[in-house]
Amino acid sequence: MSRIGKKIITLPANTEIKISGDKVSVKGPLGELSRILHPSLEVKISGNEVSVHPKKMTLESRALWGTYASHLTNMISGVNKLFEKKLILEGIGFKSEVNGDKITLALGFSHPVIVLIPEDLQVTTEKNVITISGPDKEEVGQFASKLRSLKKPEPYKGKGMRYQDEIIKRKQGKKLV
């Protein structure tokens, strides 16, 4: 039995959930998200309470039960409060700038790196902090990971792009005899 799957999800005010066939749609004040539901699971709605149940107790449905319950919880909280990730850009000459639907990064290469911003996300830059926010938790995390992979932090001086709450383990470097 899934502990997360057994929990009942409560819908906040101004939030609607619709099930049409195998598609679940959640609409709230900050947007609309939809996801295709696995055929071995079903979603039950009663008033402002939502729950996920397996149609038949198989190994696969038990494995997906908690996962889809978490996805549904993230969708409901995302349309009410945006998910946010912050990246810190450290290093001399490293800069970031948002131009429309593109982010331009100067990461110490011979050329600027230009990355397209997905439609659903809002990206802002302030000094050396890049803030990524949006209703879809997976999309926010994926885009933040994509940006971080362009210049990962190095262990000697800590230069590169890191998450705000990430701690970089520093190495000592060369020792003099």
Image: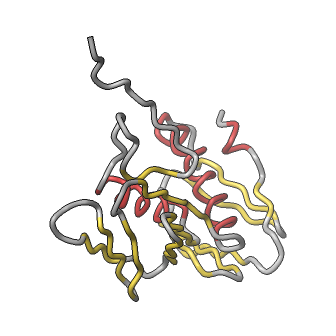
Could you tell me if residue 22 is visible in this image? no
Q: Quadrant of the N terminus?
A: top right
Q: Residue at x 76, y 57 (%)?
A: 9
> 11 or 115: nearer the eye?
115
- Most extreme residue toward the left is 110
> 64 or 73: nearer the eye?
73
Give above or below for 92 relative to 16.
above
> Residue 19's image quarter?
bottom right
Whether residue 8 sits left or right of residue 92 in the image: it is: right
Whether residue 73 sits left or right of residue 106 in the image: it is: right
Q: Residue at x 36, y 76 (%)?
A: 103
> 25 or 86: nearer the eye?
86
Q: Position of residue 119 (x, y in %)?
A: 43, 82
Q: Position of residue 112 (x, y in %)?
A: 23, 72
Give above or below for 29 relative to 173.
below
- Most extreme residue toward the bottom is 100
Give above or below for 56 relative to 83.
above
Whether residue 98 sits left or right of residue 163 in the image: it is: left
Give above or below for 68 relative to 48.
above
Q: Residue at x 63, y 52 (%)?
A: 69
Q: Residue at x 63, y 60 (%)?
A: 74
Q: Quadrant of the C terminus?
A: top left
> Residue 29's image quarter?
bottom right
Q: Position of residue 58 (x, y in %)?
A: 51, 37
Tell me which colouring the rendered structure shows.
secondary structure
